[in-house]
Amino acid sequence: MKHIPRFFLARNTVLALILLALASMLLASFIPQAFLLGPAGQAKWRADYPRLAPLAEQLGLTHIYTHPVFAIILFLTIISLLFSCREQVRLALRQTFGDAAVTAGQGIVTSLGVTELTSLLVRHGYRRIGRATTVRMVRNPWGYWGNVLFHAGMLVVIVSSLWIALIQQRGSINLAEGEVFTPGQEWPTLDLGLLARPFVLDQGVRLDRTDYEFGPSLAVKRVASALTFFDGDTPVASRTVAVNQPLDYRGLRIYQRLEFGHAFYLTVTTPDGRRSVVQLLLAHPDKPDAASYADYPDKLGKNSVLRVKYFADAEKRSLNRENPLLVLRLDESGTERGQVYLTPGKEGTIAGYGFRLEKIGRWSGLTFVKLSGIPGIFVGFFIICLGGVLHYFTPPREVAICSSPEGGARVFWRANRFAEFYREEFESLEAQLSGEKSDG
Amino acid sequence: MDRGIAYYVAVNWIIVFFYVVATIANVYGLVFGNEKMERRSFRPVACGFVIHTTSIILWWRMVGHGPYMAPSEVLSSVSWFSIVMFFLFLLVYPRLRPVSIFVFPSAFLMLAIANFYNPGIRTLPPTFGGVWLVFHIAFYKIALGTLIIAVAFSVFYLMKGRGSQVAWLQRLPELSVIDLYAYRFAGFGFIFWAIAMLAGSIWAYKSWGRYWGWDPVETWSLITWLFFGVYLHLRRFFRWNGSRAAWFFVFCFIMSLISYFVTSHMGSSVHAEYFR
């Protein structure tokens, strides 16, 4: 059975695994991934690359990170890291606590005794390891653990990522002020892990108010939403969530998305006299004199498209004035039938359809996340960094002291890694020991 | 405000002047073996650096955010970090001194390019906040400053390794030492890059509820890190060294530049707000 660990520890296997992961990522960065593009983006990509797109889709290159081959690469990497960690721990234990001192080369001959030498080296930051006859002293013994931590950290990160990918529940909604999202209601956007249960909120949530603020250069400075949670019909808690200030509530993490705007409530009267109330959620315009646009092909029946635009301020002067102007345009079979300009309480008619703007409010985008394993990611990352720091910044330096029968001792010095960097350290030690010339 | 921008640009040109003077003196000193001139080249760099630091602080106060939104701010701060990292490492490793021939011109070039961009004031999007963002950005700049040192040693190796008898190349440390320095600083850069990614993932989790989104900038950052990992693996376990390793590191360094300066321009990235 020894050949299995040997295979996974082989330098060629490790290199091949890194290169395979690299190749997957390079492919994924050149071939647009479906989850990044969204349905509209995918359709455009297919239209732009009619030959490449079907082939890429057939080979699964548009979803590389969920492709079985990528899963196999990750699985093999985990196995390799497991064996590697085991080996590294054994090695680090042996190096940290073992007695075996390295006595290569001629060493420095000194008249100092072992006890004096030990005291001198302790002053230089060396610690005695073990109790063998040949004294072994090490500076920065924790440096032996750098590789262990580095590999263990990678293992923790990969395992935690896979765990999160399997169990995460993430749903996004756009809520208008006063609107309630009830438990069991369908999520407009839902991202579920492969083994995750259906994402159902324990309590209903209502958006009470959305506040936003624009800076002098018209960039968004702040977006926040006041929420009320309901147990049945009973309000049980009120909380606020803002961009960069996520809300933790009953095992959920709620994020304020940077998506917000005005909600318009229209009463629409059809030519045959039927009335209905339509809600339009439009993204906030970027500038006072620029509009935000949306098309609704499904609101007025077949062949009719309701094209909508709105200005945050009817006078187009400021983004901070609550004075929206809604412009409706009706297209039938590709032909414009007319436009109406509406402010709250105003009405108009296009091609027999009556439109009355009843009221306006605000809306904002919220994301609800339920998952575990995030601490694993961050702890793993910290372990990787700590391991790297120990490995590259604190390489251990070892000294072996062999007492000589004629009195005095012979001292051997070596650096575990990057010996040339510590040549001055060795030379200073050599000078202090006032011995004869040595090759170190 | 416009006057403030004009002063900022003018001061940046003054800093470029100091760095150019330092570069000329440094190159002259190193190439012609004029030790006095080489030593003196550190004076204009020190002057430029003090003004550069002041300029960054004042601009920070003026725009209300760190130097990480506009291309001019990003390039200026990377230039500043390359000088800082060089001097910090020089304190610990005096044999780094000849790397100045690489660092000084890099600093003035980056700052000069920064001056050609419009330094207009950008407001930070609300998602761009918090201490983890500062760590995230700072460590990428630290990593880049460190990688410049590593690539300088790799280039030294390639130049000296050709067997050139040019005098100043002969004054550099032996090839094996140059090779080791390139290796060691690549390791430092690799770690700083990892810390930058860690801080970025914490920031992303706080801002968007996800620690990793395979966004183009994130993906290229990881690709670059893995390339550095391949380099280190080849050096350690395949005993790669010399010209082969040096060439491969130059390639990795170019990847890091692409990752840092090019991928941020991709419109589909959440990082697109940054460096526009």
Image (cartoon, helix red, strand yellow):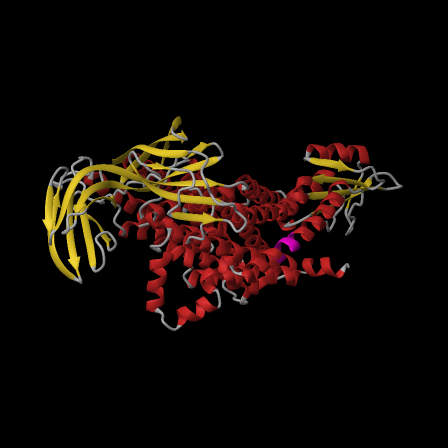
Query: Against B55, is A300 above or below?
Result: below
Q: Of all residues shown, which one is farthest toward the right? A: A405
Corner quadrant of residue A394: top right
Q: Please name the residue shown 35% across and 54% down the image.
A: B268
Q: Quadrant of the N terminus of chain B?
A: top left
The quarter of the picture where residue A322 lies is top left
Closer to the camera, A65 or A214?
A65
The single residue placed furthest to the bottom in the displayed view is: A51
Residue B238, percent across and down? 64, 62
User: Which residue is more in the foreground, A222 or B62?
Assistant: A222
Q: Nearer the viewer, residue A133 or A343?
A: A343
In the rendering, at what x and y percent does residue B61 appear?
A: 30, 34
User: From the viewer's perspective, is A130 left or right of B53?
Assistant: right
Front residue of A122/A356: it is A356
Left or right of B10: which side holds B222?
Answer: right
Residue at 44% x, 71% y is A55
- Relative horizontal placement of residue B41, taking residue B222 as reference (left or right): left
Visible in this render: residue A27? yes
Q: Residue at x 25, y 49 (%)?
A: B118
Does residue A238 appear in the picture of this structure? no
Can you give x and y, in whole percent of width and height, for residue A409 in the image? 82, 41
Residue A83 spot, x, y in % from top left: 69, 53
| B60 in the magenta segment | no
Q: Bounds of the magenta span?
A: A76-81
- Please give left or right for residue A295 compared with residue A122 in the image: left
Residue B49 to residue B187: above or below: above
